[in-house]
Amino acid sequence: MWLSQPIHTLPERLAQLVWGWALAWWRIVYLGAVVLVLALSPSSYGRAGRGLLARRMYLETTPILLGFTALAALLSLVVTRIVVVTALSYGLSRYALEMVIRVLVLELIPLTAAMFVAMRCAIPSGAQLAELRHSGRLAALERAGADPVRMELLPRVAAAGFASITLAALSCVVALVMAYLSVYGVNTAGVAAFTRMFGHVFTPEVTLVFGLKTLFFSLAIAVIPMTAGMYDLGGTERRSELGGLARMFAVLLLIEIASLLGNYY
């Protein structure tokens, strides 16, 4: 005798989909709030806590710092040269450097740094958390009286956020230097004009939006992959990882759109 399988109607499937979507986002918000509370708690920075944080930040940032900075320098040279030559051909040379800084420093580098750290650090760390959870290591820490969120999650989130902000800040400085050298060469003749142009681009409002965007990028790439590691957000482990990746890219896109609206509208 065949056992009848339950057949879900379209409204039931839609309800399950909406419930799963809402639950996944709620867990991301909840875990982000927990991490924020722990990050602001002095008890997280005892001797053992400081050691875990410093070690994780060093391991996540140092191996990728030099490579990404060199990539940013090369990208700055190429983009600057293309924009300057194109602007000269249209008689817009005085706007060339400003366009380079707006495109590279304000938009491309923070987003690229966040995505680079996500791929190299945050997503692998989230996979490690999932492995620790499936192997029972997190439950064992809890049974031993330790806080697995404080010991395993917080250092990973802090390290990913620190790496993203560090790469973005250093690469923006390198991009500015390379843009100056590409246009003016190795001399101080263009310092005054470059400084005026820099002040024209980085108004207080633009600087605030730039700082907030970089901060929110780092929070998004640090928290969302870790949430996918701490919880099964989409049924199977593979679907959970893919769902976490899609949510991370969606949040990055929304942050970028909000920054564009803040800068230019």
Image (tube, helix red, strand yellow):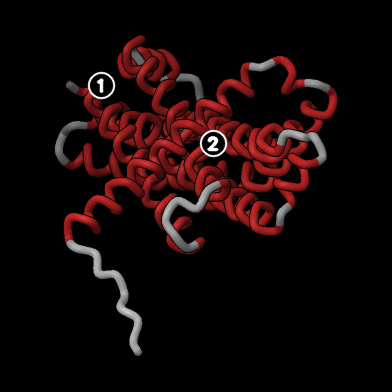
Label at residue 164: 2
Q: Position of residue 87 (x, y in %)?
A: 22, 38
Question: Residue drawn 27% across and 43% down?
Answer: 85
Q: Give coordinates of residue 205: x percent, y percent.
A: 32, 12
Residue 163: x percent and y percent?
59, 36
User: Residue 194 vs residue 163: left or right?
Assistant: left
Residue beneath the point at 48% across and 42% down: 224
Question: Mark 1 vs mark 2: which is more N-terminal?
Answer: 2
Image-based side of 27 in relation to 156, left or right:
left
Q: Amino acid at mark 1?
A: Gly
Identified at 78% across, 35% down, the residue is 146
| Residue 213, image quadrant | top left
Q: Is residue 112 left or right of residue 135?
A: left
Q: Is residue 193 visible?
A: no
Viewer-proximal residue among 101 and 233: 233
Image quarter of residue 149? top right
